[in-house]
Amino acid sequence: MKGTKNFIIQLDEIYSETFKTKGGLKIYGNVDFTAERQSNRIATVVGVPELYNTKIKKGYEVLIDASPLYRQIYRGNKQWYQAMIDEDKNQFYLDTSMVICYRKNKDEEWIGFGENCLVKPILESQEKIKTPLKLPDNVSKPNFKGKVSMCYSNAELNELGVFNGDKLYMDIRGGVKYWFEGKEYWWVRTKDIHAKIGLN
């Protein structure tokens, strides 16, 4: 199968029954309310877009924006998947902007696709919780001031000298929470990355 402007992807399953908390606890969820945590983010490419030049080949794995897997409920009726191609095979079409990372196979490391990359926030400073309740002195909350650690960089950032493991400053307004394999990341774009920490 070939696409014109879109990737054709296939999922082993659309949703998993459970998701993990930060502490590793496995929880059964209702996908009507926790779709972003239970949706499968890892897909296999079964067709590449003919009108788009890409390094991604048929058979590669991709991390996807899972929003095409979400289904709205209106007046008690759940809408069908708008991007589904083949229900029996769990195949969907996916715009190129919705592919976040890719890899050749499970033995390879993820690579950011296009302007996409995945980072983890660095919560280093502490700030007192403002509350009328009487709390112990050691109760505080982590504060994010724009520092992140690069997890899966893209080719454009690599050319600028940004690689996996680097500490960076990013736009605090950028980034979307992104879960896969039980871990939480932030999905950001190249334009959200400001500078590398530790350079003079």
Image: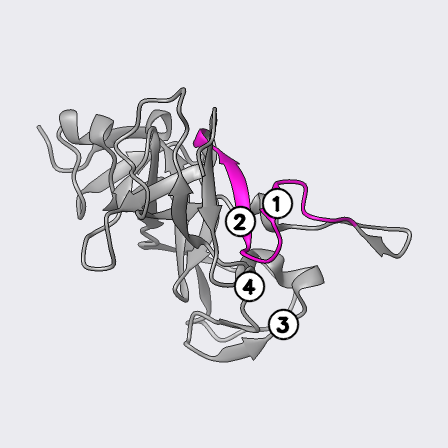
On the image, which quarter does residue 76 sit in? Answer: bottom right
Question: Is 176 above or below relative to 38?
Answer: above
Q: Which residue is mark 4?
A: 38
- Judge depth for marks 3 and 1 and give the one in front: 1
Q: Is residue 130 left or right of residue 169?
A: right
Q: Could you tell me if the residues under marks 4 and 3 are in contact, i.e. CB atoms within 8 Å?
A: yes
Q: Where residue 84 is drawn, which disc sits there?
A: 1
The amino acid marked with disc number 2 is Gln
Circle nearer the N terminus (2, 3): 3
What is the C-alpha distance between the residues marked 4 and 1?
A: 18 Å
| Within-10-Å neighbours for mark 4: few <14, some 14–19, many 20+ | many
Q: Which residue is mark 3?
A: 29
Question: Which residue is pictured at 91% across the width and 51% down the height?
Answer: 75
SS assignment at label 2: strand
Q: Is residue 172 visible?
A: yes
On the image, which quarter does residue 189 sit in? Answer: top left
Range drawn in magenta = 79-96
The amino acid marked with disc number 4 is Gln
Q: Is residue 183 left or right of residue 177?
A: left
